[in-house]
Image (spheres, rainbow, N blue to C red):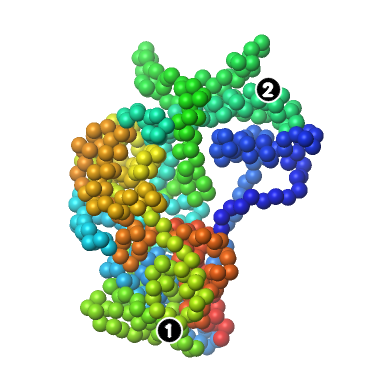
Amino acid sequence: MRDSPTQGPAGPADTAGGSGGMSRRRFLRAVGVSGGAGVMLATMGALDLAVTSDASHAGFSPPSPADFSLTGRAAGSVVILGGGVAGLAAAYELGKAGWNCTVLEAQNRIGGRSLTVRGGDEHVDLDGHRQRVGYSEGQYFNAGPARIAQWMVTMDYCRELGVPLEVFANHNADAYIFREENGMKPGQPVRRRAAQSDVYGYVSELLAKATNQGALDQAMTPQDKEKLLAFLRDFGNVGNRISGTQARDWRYLGGSQRGYTAWPGAAGVPFSRALPVPPLSQVFASEVGQELTFNVDFKHDHLMFQPVGGMDAIPLALAARVGPGRIKLGCLVTGVTDGPDRVAVTYREPDGREQRMESDYCIATLPPNLMARVPHNLGPAVQSGLTTFRPTSAGKIGLEYRSRWWETQDRIYGGITETDMDITRIWYPSHGFHSQRGVVVGYYNTDEKADAYAALRPGEREARALAQGMKVHGPKYRTELLTSFSVAWTRVPHVEGAWMDIPKDIDDPVFAPLVNGAGRVYFAGDWLSHVVSWQHGSLTSVRKVVSALHRREVSI
């Protein structure tokens, strides 16, 4: 569900001073607009207004054979459409209670969008572009999901399934920001730490000056102002009050947090800080602050995780628990017919033969844009819900390099460089440190930028990505390249989209037939969650459906 502003009566923490003054709420909102969420939350902390979260996942009790023993019934059968994370998780959870599950997957592999690419793999897109992956042994590229936040239920499944994890460096202060449209020159990117220091420093300077000059007297008590000024001195590395001259009060002059051009070392050996500090107007004109706010929402923490060896470790572990005999690959669903007592699913085998399977229930985890094409008798309300979703474009390229120059020359170990070019961002690997080679994500873009790359041949995508990446990293970005693999998710067969755009809130009545199920047919996937595009969304959606289906059968 998208966040929406709430309004209500102002409480004691919302107002200070007279009715004509600025409320604390308006004051904090203004801070957030100028400095981002991080500055606003830090300011709240200085005023003892920060809140903590004790949120946790909704309880989930997996189905159990004991649930049937009290009724004298046995578990029934379920046909599951789609062998991605949602479909495999549904079969896994229902299998705990003895349900007879069959997973039908149109591709010749499991995992859906959870795709990890390795040397020797071959992929053909809807345009007929064939790529045979040439990565070296041990190298891989997560072409789909690549990171997991600590709060996500995906972490619980990794624990339960025995999938080992390692840290994913989502934020790295030594990565770069490059905004060409705002005047940055090729070969002159800004370190994230310097950009953050400058933005936070100048926002702190302006806020301190406004506080000291009485502009916030009606919004804050004298005690509030003293707390805030003390906080800003450290947070923004600004100076103190200098009597007799307002221009020199609370000035931001940079500091060690901006980084160094020559690192500190042995005694007697000179070092130099990253200077000069650009003027305030240049910092805000460059709009580097926009890049600081990306990946800092609830889903993108500083510390995230990834499965060791590739994200496909999760679907592989689920499939191992489900059992290979219950997963049918290369089977394209051609029809779903719901009946009073059974569900009939027709599908096409890899050799072209048409097959029909009947079961007690069906769980459809296909992307809604694909499920909408499957003939069914579930009614116009279901079809209307399916067609309300719109697939989102996203693309990635994995560039394997003969050396890990980003570590040896740029001193970057993991993290993400943000740009305003159509590559959008560059990811550095969070594993294999100090090994000989590595795979860099040369672009991860969405929407129109992803569409532009999807229209190109793989070789053209590589050339375009290299030309832009060289503006950040110089000639080595091209000369050290060994090979590449790119994916355009709208052009992947049996997927045709990275994730779903939902023009309405997922709790809108138009989606009720999908959320609640239609007859003996249920639906599950990240697209039926409040966390679209994440495996967490798929897994929580599956838990809800599994609970509803199992409870329905047990209560008969």
Residue depicted at x 26% and y 41% = 466
Tell me if mark 2 has few (under 14), some (14-19) or many (20+) residues whose alpha carbon lies within 10 angstroms of its own.
some
Which of label 2 and label 1 is nearer to you?
A: 1
Q: Earlier in the sequence, mark 2 or mark 1?
A: 2
Residue depicted at x 40% and y 52% = 447
User: Looking at the rendering, in which quadrant would you find the C terminus?
Assistant: bottom right
Q: Amino acid at mark 1?
A: Thr
Residue depicted at x 64% and y 44% = 51
User: Looking at the rendering, in which quadrant would you find the N terminus?
Assistant: bottom right
Examine the image and state in which quarter residue 439 appears: top left
**Disc 2 on helix, strand or loop?**
helix
**Quick check: 308 above or below 180?**
below
Q: Whole-percent x and y of residue 399?
A: 26, 45
Q: Nearer the viewer, residue 429 or 221?
A: 221
Q: Amino acid at mark 2?
A: Asn
**Disc 1 on helix, strand or loop?**
strand
- Which residue is the site of mark 1? 337
**Quick check: 31 above or below 374?**
above
Mark sitting on residue 532 = none
Q: Residue furthest right?
A: 18
Tell me if mark 1 has few (under 14), some (14-19) or many (20+) residues whose alpha carbon lies within 10 angstroms of its own.
some
- Which residue is the site of mark 2? 212
Q: Whole-percent x and y of residue 303?
A: 46, 44
Examine the image and state in which quarter residue 90 appears: bottom left
